[in-house]
Amino acid sequence: MLLAALAATSVLGAVPAQAGAKAPDLSTKGYDYYLTGSATDVALLPPGSQMVVLMGGENDIAEPLRRLVDKARGSSSAKVDVVVIRTSGADDYNVSFSALAGVDSVETLVLKKQAAASDPEVNRIVRNADVLFIAGGDQSNYIALWKGTPLEASLGHLRSRRVPIGGSSAGMAVLGDVDYTGENGSVTSAEALADPYDKRITLSTTFITGLPGLAGTTTDTHFHVRDRMGRLVTFLARTIREGLAGLDVVRGIGVDEKTAVVADDGIATVVGSGAAYFLRPTQAADTIAAKTPLAFRNVQVHKVAASPSDATTTVRFNLTNWTRSDDTPPYYLDALSGSLTSTQAGGLVY
């Protein structure tokens, strides 16, 4: 068991701490383990619905983390145990989560080897989580190292218990039903629009599926600052063409940095300092072929800006019928001749 293993840390040898981070409480060849708080688990009643948080990355914000914790606690006064999983980095989320009211412990597992995803102790920790968070990194590593392993089954167990789940950057990228895997490197919008069959456009429907509100959905992060609208539009066109999801359910969600989409019981709100973009194709691509610019018309976009903390009215986006609670209409994008045009005033995409 882990408590016994912790006592043997000096035998295993601690990995030198990163700048600003403590050394792992336990380090093995397969994984590093960091603990803040008590490792004792207290069973909580499952929430009535599963909250999912999509964070766009870069200097993550506290509010969506707090909402995950509050969701896990419900009306209980009990404190929750947060588990963070990643393949690189250290314990920075231990600091972020432990600063929130209602947190009993934060355990970070840095899973360095594929074998760690089959480790019984790793899976025990993950299965006992009250909140599960997937940190940023490289989504191709997450898919390559975790897909088809006991760890993926443990994540499915959390879904069945309606445990709140969040992810940032690469951790967000693997939460939709259709993942952009990035296994052949990252593609830009210009490259994707010019060649929708660029070898770097790799999509998968085989890892972490079935989260509420994300059926047929591809997510993308660092959205505005890295100009990712064009590539997300291309991913949606490919999803339809490849039959990964039907036209009636294909969706895309792009999230800016320092921004998060908080989805619960089919309703999403946006918090932070940027915006989220909710995309829905209305037809299949006219032209989608290798080394040929994409021709894809009438992609509907709802841009929902983050609501300030002191806002009297918060825009709510319905992930079931793809509508918003205010009267702001969507705009539409066309991908033609390697670029995007928009019906939005001024022709702006963002």
Image (tube, grey):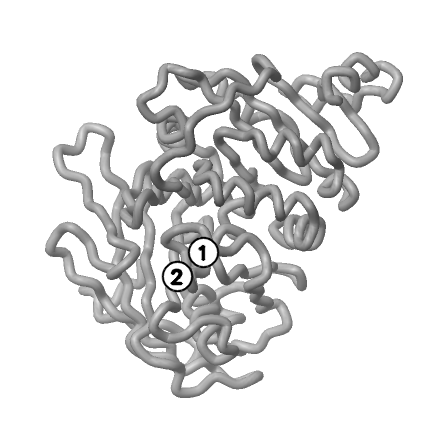
Give the image location of residue 165, x and y in percent. Answer: 47, 39
Give the image location of residue 274, x and y in percent. Answer: 33, 43
Mark 2 vs 1: CB contact within 8 A: yes
Question: Who's the residue at 83% across and 33% down the image?
Answer: 29
Question: Who's the residue at 30% across and 55% down the image?
Answer: 319
The C terminus lies in quadrant: bottom left
* Residue located beneath label 2 in the image: 252
Secondary structure of residue under mark 2: strand
130 up-or-down from 6: above or below? below
In the displayed structure image, the side of residue 269 where residue 4 appears, left or right: right
Secondary structure of residue under mark 1: strand
Question: Who's the residue at 28% across and 58% down the image?
Answer: 320
What's the distance in space between the residues labelled 2 and 1, CA to CA?
A: 6 Å
Crowding around mark 1 (Cα neighbors within 10 Å: few <14, some 14 to 19, many 20+) is many
258 up-or-down from 25: above or below? below
Give the image location of residue 252, x and y in percent. Answer: 39, 61
316 up-or-down from 21: above or below? below
In the rendered image, is residue 65 in sight? no
* Residue located beneath label 1 in the image: 219
Crowding around mark 2 (Cα neighbors within 10 Å: few <14, some 14 to 19, many 20+) is many
The N terminus lies in quadrant: top right
Say which amino acid is labelled 2: Gly
Give the image location of residue 247, x and y in percent. Answer: 37, 75
Say which amino acid is labelled 1: Thr
In the rendered image, is residue 115 in sight? yes
In the displayed structure image, the side of residue 306 where residue 11 appears, left or right: right
Residue 311 occupies quadrant: top left
